[in-house]
Amino acid sequence: MKYSTLDLSRSGMKLPVLDINYPPVFQQQRLLSLNLNLLKSITLLLTYCWLIATSASASERPTLYAPGDNVLELDINTFNRSVYNKPTAFFVEFYSSWCGHCIEYKPLYVKIATAMKRWRKVVVVAVLNCADEVNAPVCREHAIDAFPSLKYFHVNSRNKDDSINFKDDKRNVLLVTQRISEYAKGDFDKGLAPHSWPKLEFESDTKTLIDLWKGLDSSVNFLSIIVDKETALDAFSLIINYAADNRIRLNLCSSTHPIVKNLDDKNIQTPGLVIFERSKNVPVFISSDPIKSWLEMQDKLDEFLAPYPKLPEIPLETFKDSPINDAERKEAESIEVNWKQFEVQYQDLIATLHYLLTIEIPRNPFLGNAELQTLKSFIHLMRRHGPGSVPVRRLFFRLDSWLRAQHQPVISTEKYLSKVEQFQTELGHPIPANVSYLACRGSKSHLRGFTCGLWTIFHILTVRAYKERKDDSKFDPVKEVLEPIHQFIVQFLSCEVCSKNFDKMAKEDGLLNVHKPEDVVLWLWRGHNKVNKRLKGEPSEDPMFPKQQFPPESICGDCRNSDGSFNEEKAPAYKVSEFSNGKLDKVAERRLNPKFDPMAGKVDKLEEIEAKILEQEDKMIGGWNAADDEFRVVSDHHFHHFVWLSFIAIGLMIFYFQYRRNRSKFWKTFYYYNDYKVLPWRRVKSATNLHKYNA
């Protein structure tokens, strides 16, 4: 046993370390034990890191709904497995967590889902967030171009085509439930419904009350007769509602059915309700007046069912074929706000541009003629006046050039996305994914974000267009700036109510009457303030960032008159300085080599130079290819000659060596035989030379 020294170089300390000379066998065992412990530690560390990363990513996923909202939240991993080829139908809301209309609609959809929470044996209410980037392929496949969109997926549906788009008033809870029961009735009539579904049809006139009680389980305490007319949507809704309830069975009869007629000559108004209790031949309840809705019928039935125990409701989780990583996540708690609301951050612009190019524009499987023309105008505007680094602007240059070369009326979004990815790859991905919002970040995951960044980009476009084109007599502020923005919102903004409101504002506020270069800035500034005023106090408003008129007096006191109104000379001037203060350009070009600074603003020139270089390279490569092809033809022609010459050369070499060998024999023979013959078989030995051999 001996002591060695451990040098702690950072602290300058030296500590004695006990070094024991173990036998070789124990040293091997000790080494093996240390390796196993190290492997376990590394495994635990990696597992811990993975769990932290998973939980962190889950908590940051945007959502409007919480576990107690009675909706099944689906994503790209669970949608197909949960919805298709299942014995239940699905009613799905495709929403966007940043969409103000979706935020406003959420309480109504939760009310619908709560009203239908007992329907899960027949219909499951679900949601999918299209603002979550991972879900974009699902929303694109189902051609979701406006939010919120509601779709009914038939029982045992196989694909996206086995569905119905809900076109009625989605704000009327009763109407929504009645339409869903109508869709379910259609599935039943087509024979699609499994045996687990209740019977959604009128009872035959031959059925008696005894027949209806037969075959029911002993746990069934009540039997109810719903009296209704042909459509009977309330009756079907009520039957579906109690399909999983073990305490009662419901049957639908017409007012002319014998069971109804034999009820002590009472004239039951439709829709009406009759309740029978087990072992009692007399009804315990008969409605005297028409019942307004199935919800009212439900309240009456629940009064009788309350004393009897019931089975628990079917958990929503049972309808998920595979788990959602963040299904149990709760709404993000309000976070501490410590940033400035009105700062223009380059990071916000990049996050918005990525969502714009890869999620919002390719919402549908195809870009039709109207969408394509709108996209061409907007991308051209971004090419000329859009913010971003040189690679970002070069990306829009290439995208603009490619779109202008597309003359067909329709292109697929897959083709568009492949071009965006190609240009991203060529330029080093200047618009990366997974960029978080900074100044546009909301106090909750579904607040602000994209809409804040989009407004910022629009303001930058108007300010830059004004500054760069104000002295150009040919500048048309409507055609070149405002109308591309207007049409882009109408065609591509997935918040349907938002796009309609903007379109209405454009018509009412005279967008087409803008003529002066400075009015391009003024019109959008006034319009944005008008939108903020309308949305103040709405559910989509971030409570930590209340809507206010820009610029607020706290950051620009000179922008207000004495009566509190805006000074329309100083306020727009402040806006121009705010959105063109050079900060964005400095951030965008901070990684640019200084010697390329003079070319930073000349993207068109850079692309032109690179195009010429590539053209010269193509010519050189083409020349070399042509020369190579010509050489290949010539070489193929001479190859045969070479083969034949090779064979001739080999033959000559063989002949030469054989000749040398024969020549040596010839001289020896000539020396020993003076009567040497060319034909050896005719040769005769000379007597005069025999002595040479005998010697």
Image (cartoon, grey):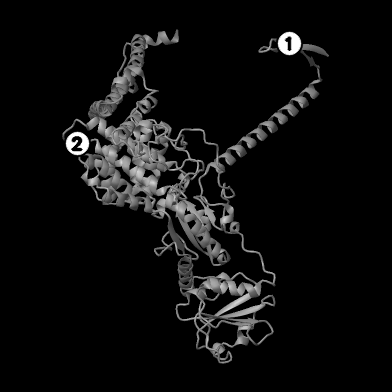
Along the polypeptide, which appears first: circle 1 or circle 2? 1
Q: Nearer the viewer, mark 1 or mark 2?
A: 2
Residue designated by label 1 = 14
Depicted 307 relative to depicted 623: above or below: below
- Rendered image: mark on residue 86: none
**Residue 48 at x, y percent in the picture:** 64, 36
Asked if residue 309 lies left or right of residue 190, the reply is right
**Residue 96 at x, y percent in the picture:** 45, 50
Q: Residue furthest left?
A: 473
Residue designated by label 2 = 475
Q: Residue at x 34, y 21 (%)?
A: 654
Depicted 344 relative to depicted 592: above or below: below
Q: Secondary structure at mark 2?
A: loop
Query: Relative to the observer, which residue lies in front, 531 or 130?
Result: 531
Location of residue 212 (image quadrant): bottom right
Location of residue 262 (image quadrant): bottom right
Query: Relative to the observer, which residue lies in front, 51 or 686?
Result: 51
**Residue 339 at x, y percent in the picture:** 48, 33
Depicted 122 relative to depicted 474: above or below: below
Q: Amino acid at mark 2?
A: Phe
Q: Is residue 145 in view?
A: no
